[in-house]
Image (cartoon, rainbow, N blue to C red):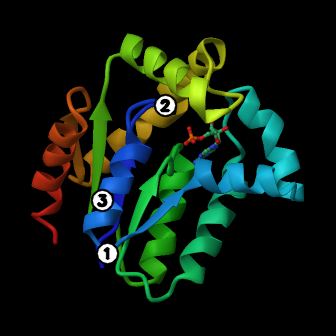
């Protein structure tokens, strides 16, 4: 089993690169953002609760997303491994994920962090907003999301660095070039 965290700020390309990874490797893609948007779309209690927090660019409480991820991991006992995308986003989430995986006799193999300059992130997200219909893909909300990233999410990279699992790559360039940087790392594990 290989479990991977794809890490980076909003607009770094985590979702796009995840699609390439699941095309080529037998991994299950778990994106907390996608799961939450599906809950909003379905009008569930969780979706109703999370929508306002998401629209403001803030983070949904740890216990909510940890429970979501725990349920998804339990729902796919046959998985060969997982790509975690947009999770963990805080230190308590990272600690909880370690425990969840340890209980399954496995662990995170590596975290791949996509580095992209802030101006580029903002322009990518605003451009994505023109087609995504996501209420949080606009210049104002992305600033808030980047602030949350700096304050609460960035420490998660140090958490994995202290376990010697962090790989930082340049997230600028053609999609193929960026994916090549990712596979160069993944192929050490698979
Ligand atoms: P994303 O699609 O990953 O950019 O996530 C969109 C929004 O969903 C975020 O701005 C948060 O409001 C919420 N969200 C997604 N993943 C998490 C997480 N791991 N912890 C807290 N909130 C999250």
Q: Reading the chain from its start, which is encountered first: label 1 or label 3?
A: 3
Is residue 85 visible to us here?
A: yes
What residue did someone put label 2 on? Answer: 10
Q: Name the mark on residue 21.
A: 3
Instruction: Identify the image quadrant of the C terminus.
Output: bottom left
Horizontal side, residue 42 vs residue 27: left or right: right
What residue did someone put label 1 on? Answer: 26
Instruction: Identify the image quadrant of the N terminus.
Output: bottom left
Q: Reading the chain from its start, which is encountered first: label 2 or label 1?
A: 2
Q: Nearer the viewer, mark 2 or mark 1?
A: 1
Cβ at disc 2 under 8 Å from ligand 1: yes
Residue 2 on image: x %, y %: 29, 72
In the image, residue 42 above or below residue 72:
above
Q: Nearer the viewer, mark 3 or mark 2?
A: 3
Q: Reading the chain from its start, which is encountered first: label 3 or label 2?
A: 2
Is residue 7 visible to us here?
A: no
Q: Which residue reaches farthest front?
A: 131
Residue 155 on image: x %, y %: 42, 36
Q: Name the mark on residue 119.
A: none
Q: Label 2: how many residues lie within 10 Å, few (<14), some (14-19) or many (20+)?
A: many
**Separation (CA) of disc 1 from disc 3:** 8 Å
Q: Which residue does the image show at 66% across and 37% down from the upper left?
A: 59
């Amino acid at each position: 089993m290989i479990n991977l965290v794809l890490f980076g700020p909003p607009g770094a390309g985590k979702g796009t690169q995840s699609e390439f990874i699941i095309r080529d490797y037998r991994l299950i893609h778990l994106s907390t953002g996608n799961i939450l948007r599906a809950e909003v779309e379905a009008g569930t209690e969780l979706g109703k609760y999370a929508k306002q927090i998401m629209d403001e660019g803030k983070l949904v409480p740890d216990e909510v997303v940890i429970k979501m991820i725990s349920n998804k991991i339990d729902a796919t006992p046959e998985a060969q491994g997982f790509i975690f995308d947009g999770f963990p986003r805080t230190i308590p989430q990272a600690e909880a994920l370690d425990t969840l995986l340890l209980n399954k006799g496995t662990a995170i193999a590596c975290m791949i962090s996509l580095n992209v300059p802030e101006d580029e992130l903002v322009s990518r997200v605003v451009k994505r907003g023109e087609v995504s219909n996501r209420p949080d893909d606009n210049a104002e909300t992305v600033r808030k999301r980047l602030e949350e990233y700096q304050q609460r999410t960035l420490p998660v990279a140090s958490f994995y660095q202290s376990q010697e699992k962090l790989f930082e790559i340049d997230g600028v360039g053609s999609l193929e070039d960026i994916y090549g940087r990712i596979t160069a790392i993944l192929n050490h594990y698979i």
